[in-house]
Each structure stands twice: as C-alpha cells, then as structure tokens.
Amino acid sequence: MENKNDSSIETNAYKKLNFFLKQIRTKTDFVPETAIVLGSGLGNFSNKIKQECTISYADIDGFPVSTNKMHAGRFIFGYIENKPIVLMDGRIHYYEGYTMEQVVTPIRIMKMLGAKNLILTNAAGGIDNGFKPGDLMIITDHITSFIPSPLIGPNIEELGVRFPDMTHVYNPELIDKLKSIGRDKQIDLKEGVYLQTTGPNYETPAEIRAYKALGANAVGMSTACEAMIATHCGMKICGLSCITNMAAGITGEPLDDSEVVEVASTVADKLETILYNLVKNL
Ligand code: HPA
C-alpha cells in the first residue's frame, strides 16, 4: 500500500493554495484588510469602490470559475474611503459541481492575501414568518448539517486547527456594528439563523417545515461553508442575507430565480449603504 501520511497530503493542499497566491502576486501586491463576498444580484457594489486592480478567476491557472450567469467571477482590489478591501465579485457554489475544497478556495486565498475581516452577503429564502421579501437579515449563526464540511480531508495546519470551535462564527462586535449602522441609517435589519443546502433545487415545503423546526430563519445555497472555512483560518466574520422570497410552501407560490435577482436588485441600495458604512468603521 502506498505510504501517504497526512502531512504529505496536507502539504499538497497548501501548495495548491500557494500556487494560486503566487500567480495573484505576479499581478498585484495589494494587501486587503477586509474581504467582501457579493451574493446574487448584488454585484453593483463594485461601483462604490476606488478600484486598483481586477483579476478574473479564469486568469488564475487551476482556479475554480463561477458558471452561474449571475456571478461575474473576479477579485476586485481597491479602497472604500481609505480601507483596503478585496471584493469577490461572483462566488463558487457547491451545486456547480466543484468540491467543497474548491468552493472555499477563494476565501482562503483572500485570507492569505492579508484579509483579516470577512463580510458575506447572499440571497436567501425567508423561513421566519416575520420576514418579507426585501428584508435584510444579519446572520447570527448557521446550520451546515445538510452539506459536507469543507474541512473534511487532511488539515492545513498552516491555516488552522483540526477541530475548530464554531461557537462564535459571526463576530458579536461586527453584529453590534451592523445593528448600530441600521439604526443610524434607519434601515430595518432582521436577525436570524441561516441554513445552507447544497442546491441547486429549491426546497420542498416539508423540508422548509423541518428546517424551521430546527431553528432556521432563512435558507440558501452558499455562505455557511465560507463562514466555516474563514473561522478555521481565524477571520473576523459577519454576514447579511437579502431575503429575496419566502421559502417554499410559505406563501404557496412556486419559486423562480428571476424573482431572486429582481428583489436582490431592489434592496441593493440598502445593502450597499450598510456595507460601505461597516467597512468605513472597521
Ligand atoms: N432557497 C434556497 N436558496 C435561495 C432561496 C430559497 O428559497 N432564495 C434565494 N436563494
């Protein structure tokens, strides 16, 4: 039998990340402090940034590219006020057929580029009866029990521990900052637990009833795996869900992705105000 001990495999996974990092470093020496992931229909935020450099995922040899037409697939480096940031304009989803390791690669890369904070945004279905389409929800915790952990496989010791604690994935200080920005700007912010499914299908009404019983307030196909990997490598995280529709069975209406994009674009202004002010205050 081949003698492959953990550390040799581990070195390979880390080597791959360093291979990507090296390619990015041939294009820019920009060091971001904060990383932001833009969800479906929220890509316009890039216009709010004093852009320094853009790198398409497709220009990084071996890097996963987003196949979803609503996701551009590039890193944007630049400034909000004087704060250096990297924007992930287009994320990678598990439902596209990538492995979980590939899905979370851009998050790890942004950390390796220097980002200490991570702001996650997404489009999500509302499960909580107190929500309506167009609401914004601060993610206070998540449920990942229905997706494979992105940490399965040899641990990358250089990035984090084998058994990372998940008690405070979403940073309480950042949550407080979000709430205070909401109050100042008179933007109503809900709070709740985000549950991630694999997608790409939307859920059945029975699944939504089950997720509700488990404590979920919103459901989506991204984000929680990214928050998990970022917790592993020690980033300070917060997340905002744009409730684009009520989840299956709640109103009885069938779900449609054009509704998701349409509603996300109507809330984009509110979300951009929150993001801008949060980065400014970090
Ligand atoms: N379910 C899963 N993902 C989603 C939904 C939903 O209802 N809306 C937007 N993303």
Image (spheres, rainbow, N blue to C red):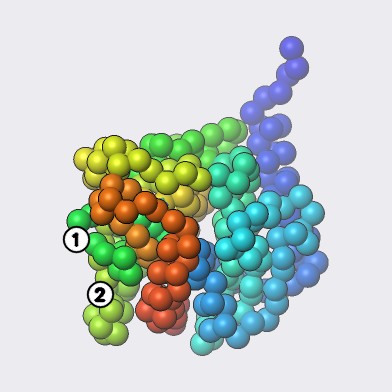
Q: Looking at the image, is 209 positioned above or below residue 47?
A: above
**Classed neighbour count for the residue bearing mark 2: other residues with Cα under 10 Å, few (<14), some (14–19), many (≥20):** few
Q: Image quadrant for the N terminus?
A: top right
Mark 2 vs mark 1, CA separation in Å: 13 Å
Q: Image quadrant for the C terminus?
A: bottom left
Name the residue: 57% across, 63% down: 70
The percent position of residue 121, horizontal first and vertical second, equals 44, 64
- Secondary element under disc 1, as helix, strand or loop, is loop
Q: Which one is nearer the viewer's eye here, 51 or 265?
A: 265
Taking the image as drawn, is residue 34 in sight? no
Q: Name the residue under label 2.
A: 188
Name the residue: 54% across, 77% down: 44
The percent position of residue 261, horizontal first and vertical second, equals 47, 66
Taking the image as drawn, is residue 30 in sight? yes
Residue type at the position of mark 1: Gly
Q: Name the residue under label 1.
A: 130
